[in-house]
Image (cartoon, rainbow, N blue to C red):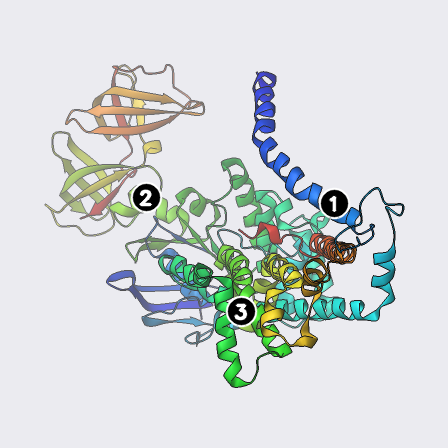
Amino acid sequence: MALLEIRNVTRRFGALEAVKDVSLAIEAGEFFTLLGPSGCGKTTILRMIAGFDEPGEGEILLDGKSLAGVPPEKRPLHTVFQSYALFPHMTVAGNIAFPLEMAGKSALEIRRRVGETLALVHLEDKAASFPHELSGGQKQRVALARGLVNQPRLLLLDEPLGALDAKLRVEMQIELIALQREVGITFVFVTHSQQEALALSHRIAVMRGGRVEQCDEPDQLYTQPANRFVADFVGKINLIEVAVTASSKVLLGLHASGLGEIAATDPRPLAVGEKGAFALRPELIRVHGHKESADLKNRFQGRVRELLYLGDVTLYKVELANGAVIEALMPNAAPGRAKFHEVGDAVWVCWRHDAGVFLRN
Amino acid sequence: MNTTRSRPAGFAKWIVTLPPTLFLLAFFLLPALIVVLAGFRETGEFGGLAPVDSVAALSLDAWRFLLGDVIYLEIFLRSFFVAALTTLICIVLAYPLAWLIARSPKQRRDFLVLLVILPFASNFLVRIYAWIMLLGPAGLLYTPFAVIVGMVYAHLPFMVLPLYTNLEKHDPALLEAAQDLGANAWTRFWRVTFPLSLPGIFSGSALVFIPVLGMFAVPELLGGTGDILIGNLIKEQFLENRDWPLGSALSIMLTACVLALAGLAAWAAKRGLHGTEAVT
């Protein structure tokens, strides 16, 4: 049985359907992420789990028991707020002790647990500090410690890294993964950053317009996106309009108008003539000069329109015969890369037949 | 670059602050010093102050008189009690009101605040006379009760406004966090809202307590003969008894008490209100 189950939950605000018939099951010990652009309903789901909001239809179950009508203070789960919401009039230790006091723990146990939790987030020396004396990253860690100290069944995190600068955010991501592994508490994480979601999660539910578009493990989500939205939202991707010309077992023949035939793979039986998009990650495309040979099935001529040298990789924007621009990401350390291509160079863009995914319309 | 920019800024600072400084020196500090001096002078033949060229230019007569009669201590204590009681009642009445205004929709708040300060649009004495009409038929006029009612009525807005200003700034996420971490409504109020509103309570209390301490109109109009406070006493010395040294000595005592209280409050605030200044 899943730890938390969301069953056909719908939530309307007036005429707006913020969450539409969402069903999810979150397992114990999981790092589960709700990913989506702002207004996709991810925060509404989080608030319904926390109890600040109730589903209009459907139900949320924790350990198989419905949470309907249970007020937030009675739910065995805690939230880490985007703004941290640390109590400004309490010290760090006072903040962390708060949930333990609410749970009626003894003074001795409170002191022990606060000490342990402070050590867990490396803030032993800040116990007597007040929140306004801390840096952003330290506040973040206090908020985490306060959420974890009473060992909730579930920790909800509402864009907790959003307020940090880029470098600190990466550091906190690494800390967060280590922390979750160490305490073994189930995390439900809300973010609009696909990079953050991919880096942190065991599983990700990609949301749009109140619906879950796809729920899968990060690598599955990245390599096998279910539709155009997921493909485009998670990572960079090229989308080429195509029609199916042949489908046999796993091999798939596609035709892109003005470009030609594309060889691909797909285990699904697809009808000839079906239209869709061929989705291809930039890092799976090789860009070669005329004289170089590339033993790849898919080879198309093009011309370099723009290039962006990023140090470890170079991003090429190559215009193909049909006028479409395809993005390719080439590692600069790749063997056999004899020379850089320049803007205006005629090149070949190539990829393996199993590199992309066909997305049905 | 920095020095060339800071120099005119410093100069401008002087220009801007000079007029109010001069004003306060001339019309506040100087009169205050005159009062202090007057407290150590003798009464003139026909009241007021004795001429400066008199033999006994300075004397402690007024102070001896003041400390020699227990009635003055009694009036001081009564004044403090009335001020404290008024402040307490104002807190109890103003808190829910300020909280409700702070919690009402944004576009309605300004209107509600306007309603709180609307009584100021009419004359203070007119409003106190209205209380005479209200309390008289009920048989409550000229009682300590009437004095407290008048004091609370006159000073309530001074408690509501700073409390509202404070409560309005509270981050609702803090209450959600407290609830999320297991606090019920009662605990949320006492552990989060109340401690964070202490600066508002403190400034409101100062705005109520100090004026009430010196107020003479309310006890004079609504109170009985036994209800006179320091304010009445001081006014009596200057206007009726013409004993200026005694009036001055009483004023100095009052000011000293208020300053001591303010200092104590500031010290307590610094120790006990840590972090609350960062409410927003």
The alpha-carbon separation of the residues under discs 1 and 3 comes to 34 Å
The alpha-carbon separation of the residues under discs 3 and 2 comes to 62 Å
Q: Which residue is at 57% across, 43% downward?
A: A136
> Compared to A304, does B240 lie above or below?
below
Secondary structure, mark 1, is: helix
> Compared to A293, does A133 lie above or below?
below
Point out the frontmost of discs 1 and 2: 1
Q: Which residue is at 52% across, 80% downward?
A: B135
Residue found at the far front of this picture: B46
Question: Which residue position holds label 3?
Answer: B153
Q: Do labels 1 and 3 share a chain?
A: yes
Quarter of the image for residue A312 reads top left
The residue marked by circle 2 belongs to what chain?
A
Question: Which residue position holds label 2?
Answer: A233
Point out the frontmost of discs 1 and 3: 1
Q: Where is residue A73 in the image (x, y as percent from the top left)?
A: 52, 70
Question: Is residue A169 or residue A326 the one in the foreground?
Answer: A169
The residue marked by circle 3 belongs to what chain?
B
Q: Where is residue A20 in the image (x, y as percent from the top left)?
A: 28, 62
Q: Which residue is at 35% across, 55% downward?
A: A215
The amino acid pointed to by label 3 is: Tyr
Residue found at the far right of this picture: B55
Dot 1 crowding, Cα within 10 Å, few <14, some 14–19, many 20+: few
The amino acid pointed to by label 2 is: Phe
Q: Where is residue A70 in the image (x, y as percent from the top left)?
A: 46, 75
The alpha-carbon separation of the residues under discs 1 and 2 comes to 78 Å
